[in-house]
Amino acid sequence: MPDLSRRRWLLQVARAGAAIGAGWSLPTGPAWAGAQKEEQLSDAVRTALAAQIAEAPPPQPHFRDANHFAQYWVWLATESARLQNRIPGFSVRRDFLQTVWYEAHRAGLEPALILGLIQVESGFKKYAISSAGAMGYMQVMPFWTQQIGNGDITSLFHMQVNLRYGCVILRHYLNIENGSLFYALGRYNGSRGKAAYPDAVLAARQRWLVAGGSG
């Protein structure tokens, strides 16, 4: 990415944080806060991704049967307890997990994988901003809002919008990498082919698996 473009992004991000009056900060601890690299998308891919971002129904879970319903509540209760120290408010935690579950399944992804990625990328900080300008829970780069969204980078601080972008982007990378999670995660972090980031996400994923829960 050209240095001028990066500076412009960081300036926009700083203005976004000030505009919403939120306590945003650089992630601390083990967060990697990587950066997807901007690539040229074909018109067909751009249109398809834009449609996936634009559809925003309320993230209400859908269940195949009573057993699936029971599994979901086991998953929700377990993950809520695990997240208590990171997201203290119960209603905020519940809404976050419900949205993770909805957006992960919508994109054909595993909720534990998404939680692991969020842990590594932002440490579950809603207003995290990386040195490269990646934003929010899933550290989405602002250029995606220009490529497939409405151009409003402040929307990346909205929980469902951020999770929607992150899940759609990861699914896109999985598709172009022919299902290789190793390479897709590398693309997500901007470190394709290097093992450190995929290894970190997959290790974090293990901590969010729920025996008997909905995944």
Image (spheres, rainbow, N blue to C red):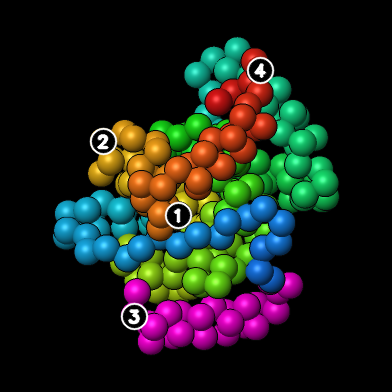
Q: Earlier in the sequence, mark 2 or mark 1?
A: 2
Residue located beneath label 2 in the image = 178
| 18 versus 79 height, above or below | below
Of tags 3 and 4, which is closer to the observer? Answer: 3
Answer whether residue 15 is magenta in the image.
yes
At 44% from the left and 70% from the top, the residue drawn is 142
Residue located beneath label 3 in the image = 2
From the top left corner, tell me how far across and down residue 159 is, in percent.
Answer: 59, 56
* Distance of label 2 from label 3 (alpha carbons): 29 Å
User: Type of residue at label 1?
Assistant: Asn
Residue 86 shows in this picture: yes
* Distance of label 3 from label 4 (alpha carbons): 46 Å
Badge 2: few (under 14), some or many (20 or more) residues near its Cα, within 10 Å? few
* Distance of label 4 from label 1 (alpha carbons): 29 Å
Q: Which residues are magenta?
A: 1-24
At 50% from the left and 46% from the top, the residue drawn is 196
- Residue 211's label in the rendered image is 4
Front one among 74 and 32: 32
| Secondary structure beneath label 4 | loop
| Secondary structure beneath label 2 | loop
Front one among 122 and 52: 122
Q: Earlier in the sequence, mark 4 or mark 2?
A: 2
